Image (tube, rainbow, N blue to C red):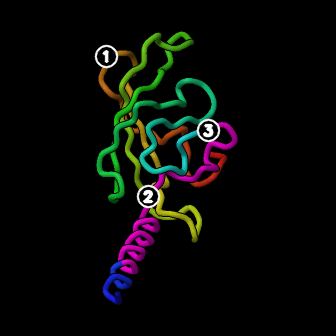
């Protein structure tokens, strides 16, 4: 019976360690009040809660939980003379600066970079900070 109790303790300890090792993208308060995906692990969609260019959907991550993580997703981009192109484009994301937004919080990627084409089918542009934000930990850029 003692070996069963010991095994249960090991499983519980491993679960607690895994929960503490959970890595999220920034903080849920980053794009408050109407943003989504922030403060979650491997979000499939992120949104600033504003215009369509601030939404990325169908996100596919690689390297999640490591020092950096990369992803591709779909987003709207602006047309040169206003409005948006009618179809979504593929963009790339790069999450970095693994740390904590709060001392008691989970590990989080605290910066996000994105690059997108200037027009559908075009080459990807240079890496830019997501929404010009210095940190994904708090609302306000």
Q: Is residue 135 visible?
A: no
Q: Secondary structure at mark 2?
A: strand
Q: Is residue 105 above or below residue 1?
A: above
* Residue 31 found in image quarter: top right
Q: Position of residue 37 (x, y in %)?
A: 53, 42
Q: Marks 2 and 1: which is nearer the front? A: 2
In this rendering, position of residue 2 left or right of residue 35: left
Give the distance between the C-alpha atoms of the residues marked 1 and 3, in whole angstroms: 28 Å
Residue topped by disc 2? 23
* Residue 126 found in image quarter: top left
Q: Residue at x 45, y 51 (%)?
A: 41
Q: Secondary structure at mark 1?
A: loop
Q: Position of residue 39 (x, y in %)?
A: 54, 51
The magenta span reads 8-34
Q: Position of residue 132 (x, y in %)?
A: 54, 41
Q: Is residue 81 above or below residue 24?
A: above
User: How many residues crowd around disc 3 within 10 Å: few (fewer than 14), some, or many (20 or more)?
Assistant: some
Residue topped by disc 1? 121
Closer to the camera in the image, 42 or 83? 42
User: How many residues crowd around disc 2 within 10 Å: few (fewer than 14), some, or many (20 or more)?
Assistant: many
Please state, as top left, top right, bottom left or bottom right, where the C terminus lies in the image: top right
Residue topped by disc 3? 35
């Amino acid at each position: 019976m003692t070996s069963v109790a010991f095994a249960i303790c090991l499983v519980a300890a491993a679960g607690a360690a895994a929960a503490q090792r959970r890595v999220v993208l920034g903080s849920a308060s980053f794009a408050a009040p109407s943003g989504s995906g922030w403060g979650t692990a491997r979000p499939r969609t992120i949104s600033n809660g504003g215009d369509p260019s601030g939404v990325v959907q169908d996100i596919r991550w690689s390297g999640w939980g490591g020092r950096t993580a990369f992803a591709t997703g779909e987003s709207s981009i602006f047309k040169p003379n206003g409005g948006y192109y009618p179809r979504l484009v593929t963009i790339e994301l790069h999450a970095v600066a693994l740390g904590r937004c709060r001392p008691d919080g989970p590990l989080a990627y605290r910066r996000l970079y994105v690059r997108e084409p200037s027009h559908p089918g075009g080459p990807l542009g240079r890496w830019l900070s997501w929404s010009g934000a210095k940190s994904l930990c708090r609302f306000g850029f």
